[in-house]
Image (tube, rainbow, N blue to C red):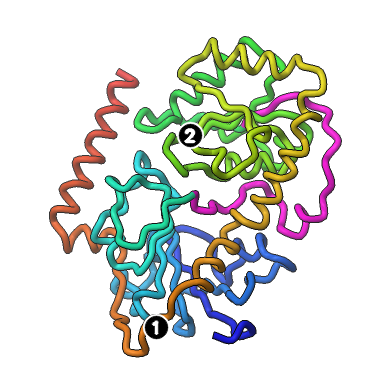
């Protein structure tokens, strides 16, 4: 394909504000939904596309809850933004796609063309690509913050994260806590920009699973004190992240106290944070990731199959074994929640 030829990429999602690609556009240069030769469009009924990218699931407004493909099936990508403790996508649903970009484990979501990686979760930081590129290191007046909502689901890390944060606050009064049901902020940047360090705890711990919780911290030039992805240093410089284990409260408290009381610790790590920040902006940014995958893909034959893609619910109905596995998983999560609060 000629390097100047635009590749038309349709974005589809359930329950996301992606009309016109506006969310993705904010993470692209000039606030335009384009990266490299890929031009993104999220009009739900568009038929003018060369690739289809589905984020988690199809829109519920599609007739028949399916997408009649206007591109070869091999030119389709499923992105899973949720870990295996939060969402079960189903083998049959995923098998409809030519590729999947996922942090889910092989046992949870097998696929012949799986890219096991972080999945470029959209930033919650609250500033655009152009804004973050123009910002220099921020003058820090605060010490440590965290964003931790009042959610306490027992089948994920939510409950442990909440309990750890409240216990840590009792030991470290300097910790500023923000989040839904706790302390409202208009933009997540308000909980990051003034602070040197930021406590970030993922809702699920597995290889490759790191999210905007980590990316947003780097965008705000903060040093993340982090519990999550065990291979995080495959992605970022070692000095850019301080790892803790929230299941070891005393060990975590000791590490955090040492970091907060060491003169020049933030300044010593700032260059590594800058490097990590640049990686978030230019390499692990979702439009950049999609552009690399699509531009490097082998073109399918001219007579390649198109067909259709059905949403997750329809595929569970069409494949009873998938429905049973999903029901068992939901039931187990429900029982864990009962045990937590009984």
| Secondary structure state at the residue bearing disc 1 | loop
Quadrant in the picture for residue 155: top left
Q: Is residue 98 above or below residue 229?
A: below
Q: Do the residues labelled 2 and 1 touch (CB within 8 Å)?
A: no
In the rendered image, the residue lying farthest to the left is 320
Q: What element carries label 2?
A: loop
Q: Name the residue under label 1.
A: 70
Left or right of 268, for residue 255: left
Which sits earlier in the primary sequence, circle 2 or circle 1? 1
Residue with the mark numbered 2:
230
> Quadrant location of residue 84?
top left
Q: Where is residue 40 in the image (x, y as percent from the top left)?
A: 56, 73
The magenta segment is: 118-146
Q: Which quarter of the image is occupied by the N terminus? A: bottom right
Direction from residue 102 to residue 319 in the image, left or right? left
Q: Describe residue 153's horizontal placement relative to residue 36 as left or right.
A: left
- Identify which residue, 332 or 63, lies in the foreground: 332
The stretch drawn in magenta includes residue 273: no
Image position of 137 with respect to 128: above or below: above
């Amino acid at each position: 394909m000629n390097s100047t030829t635009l590749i038309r990429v349709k974005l589809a999602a359930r329950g996301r504000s992606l009309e016109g690609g506006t969310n993705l556009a904010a993470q692209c240069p000039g606030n335009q939904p384009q990266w490299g030769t890929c031009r993104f469009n999220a009009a739900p009924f568009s038929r003018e596309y060369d690739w289809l990218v589905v984020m988690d699931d199809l829109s519920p407004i599609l007739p028949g809850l399916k997408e009649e493909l206007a591109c070869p099936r091999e030119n389709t990508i499923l992105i899973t933004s949720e870990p295996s403790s939060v969402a079960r996508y189903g083998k049959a649903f995923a098998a409809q796609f030519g590729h999947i970009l996922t942090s889910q484990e092989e046992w949870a979501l097998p696929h012949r063309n799986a890219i096991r990686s972080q999945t470029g979760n959209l930033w919650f930081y609250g500033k655009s690509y152009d804004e973050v590129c123009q910002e220099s290191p921020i003058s820090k007046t605060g010490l440590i913050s965290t964003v931790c909502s009042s959610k306490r689901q027992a089948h994920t890390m939510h409950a442990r994260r909440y309990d750890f944060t409240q216990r840590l606050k009792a030991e470290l009064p300097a910790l500023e806590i923000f989040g839904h049901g706790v302390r409202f902020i208009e933009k997540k940047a308000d909980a990051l920009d003034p602070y040197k360090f930021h406590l970030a705890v993922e809702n699920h711990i597995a290889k490759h699973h790191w999210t905007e919780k980590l990316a947003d911290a780097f965008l705000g030039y903060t040093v993340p004190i982090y519990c999550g992805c065990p291979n995080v240093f495959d992605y970022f410089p070692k000095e850019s992240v301080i790892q803790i284990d929230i299941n070891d409260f005393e060990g975590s408290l000791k590490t955090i106290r040492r970091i907060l009381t060491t003169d020049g610790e933030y300044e010593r790590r700032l260059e590594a944070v800058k490097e990590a920040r640049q990686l978030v902006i230019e390499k692990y940014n979702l439009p950049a990731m999609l552009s690399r995958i699509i531009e490097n893909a082998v073109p399918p034959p001219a007579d390649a199959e198109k067909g259709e893609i059905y949403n997750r619910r329809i595929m569970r109905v069409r494949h009873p074994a998938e429905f049973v596995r999903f029901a068992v998983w939901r039931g187990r999560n429900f029982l864990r929640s009962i045990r937590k609060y009984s």
